[in-house]
Amino acid sequence: MKDSMNNCEIAVAPMMDWTDRHCRYFMRLLSPSAVLYTEMVTAAAIHHGDAGRLLRFNAEEHPLVLQIGGSEPEWMASATRKAIHYGYDEININVGCPSDRVQSGQFGACLMARPETVAECYRAMRQETDILITVKTRIGIDDNDSYDFLRGFVEQLAAAGCSKFDVHARIAILDGLSPKENRSIPPLDYARVYRLKRDFPELTIVLNGGLTTIAEVEDVLQHVDGAMIGRQAYHRPYFLAELENHFNPDFALPNRRDIVEQILPYIESVLAAGEPLARVTRHMLGLYAGQPGARSWRRYISEHAHLRDAGPQVLINALKAMPLAA
Ligand SMILES: Cc1cc2nc3c(=O)[nH]c(=O)nc-3n(C[C@H](O)[C@H](O)[C@H](O)COP(=O)(O)O)c2cc1C
């Protein structure tokens, strides 16, 4: 999916509890071509659990990548087998998450130290499908904070056939930092990711971590094939529309009001399926971030979306307080 925006990939990072299918539906309205990622789903959950509930998505969400966490090749293969029926465009292996829960399951960032295990998973998954299987990783873990360590990891995966890597440009500290701290305390090192691309020009390298402006994204794309945006896309989703407009000038910047109106039929369908309004609107709180009225937008929705029988009128009322042009 390299040509999502003018021959480079702009992606929204996988984020647990955030990038669910409602969030992705909303983001898709803001950006027709950004590559969207699911939250991480564990292979064990897909294997043993209600795969339908975990894997279903709206057709509008394409291009869409499913992120799977796990380290058992058979389970990763079984999860892949189930997932491909849903029509994902790509499957991504999580080698970046530092949480304790993930480490005790022996997957996530700790797998950087076990490239042969990840390669085995990759091969087992590859046997199930022709769609792209990719890896999201850090640039190192704990004391393994060197370019050579990163290169060794990528080399083994590339030898197994993996051709695309999303690289969060900071190491993970597995002992002593919370997942949240692990997204801010270890310093960003874009140069290490750029060097990886120079050494493996045939691989698709997508850089992730700390990107908040179009200028930064532009700069990164001088060096690598894609840019993945996490928190900024969630907290200020209109950034996705700005990026789309920048890289695809045919796409006119939408009015935020139009985005809200476009999502109303979807909200009706979600309510009809028995889900509460807030499941969708919680992802929309940042729509006006940085604009006049941002606070009242956020406050009105937060105070009203949870009420019994709350429906699309909550958004319509919230819009009434907003400036027309924003
Ligand atoms: C709430 C939250 C949940 C996350 N969940 C995942 C996840 O499920 N899988 C994953 O690979 N990374 C996860 N991440 C990390 C992001 O994908 C991304 O690597 C990180 O936020 C750095 O990018 P950013 O600086 O653009 O936010 C999560 C980040 C956040 C903020």
Image (cartoon, rainbow, N blue to C red):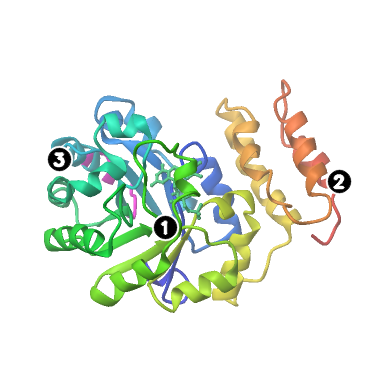
Q: Is residue 184 at all visible to an observer of this figure?
A: yes
Residue for badge 2: 320
Q: State yes or no: residue 301 in magenta.
A: no
> Helix, strand, or loop for circle 3?
helix
Residue at image point 12% right, 58% down: 160
Question: Between marks 2 and 3, how big is the CA–CA gap?
Answer: 53 Å
Residue for badge 1: 63
In this orientation, which residue lies closer to the viewer: 182 or 239? 182
> Helix, strand, or loop for circle 1?
loop
Residue at image point 13% right, 51% down: 123
Whether residue 153 is situated above or below residue 54 in the rendered picture: below
Badge 2, how many Cα within 10 Å: few under 14, some, many 20+? few
Mark 1 and mark 2 lie on one chain; the one further toward the N terminus is 1
Q: Quadrant of the C terminus?
A: bottom right
In the rendered image, residue 140, in percent from the top left (x then y), is placed at 30, 54
Whether residue 14 is situated above or below residue 201 in the rendered picture: above
Is residue 33 shown left or right of residue 316? Answer: left
Residue for badge 3: 73
In this orientation, which residue lies closer to the viewer: 42 or 4? 42
User: What is the span of residues highlighted in magenta in the rendered image?
Assistant: 81-89
Q: Amino acid at mark 1?
A: Pro
Residue at image point 62% right, 27% down: 276
**Label 1 beta carbon less than 8 Å to ligand 1:** no
Question: Between marks 3 and 1, how big is the CA–CA gap?
Answer: 26 Å
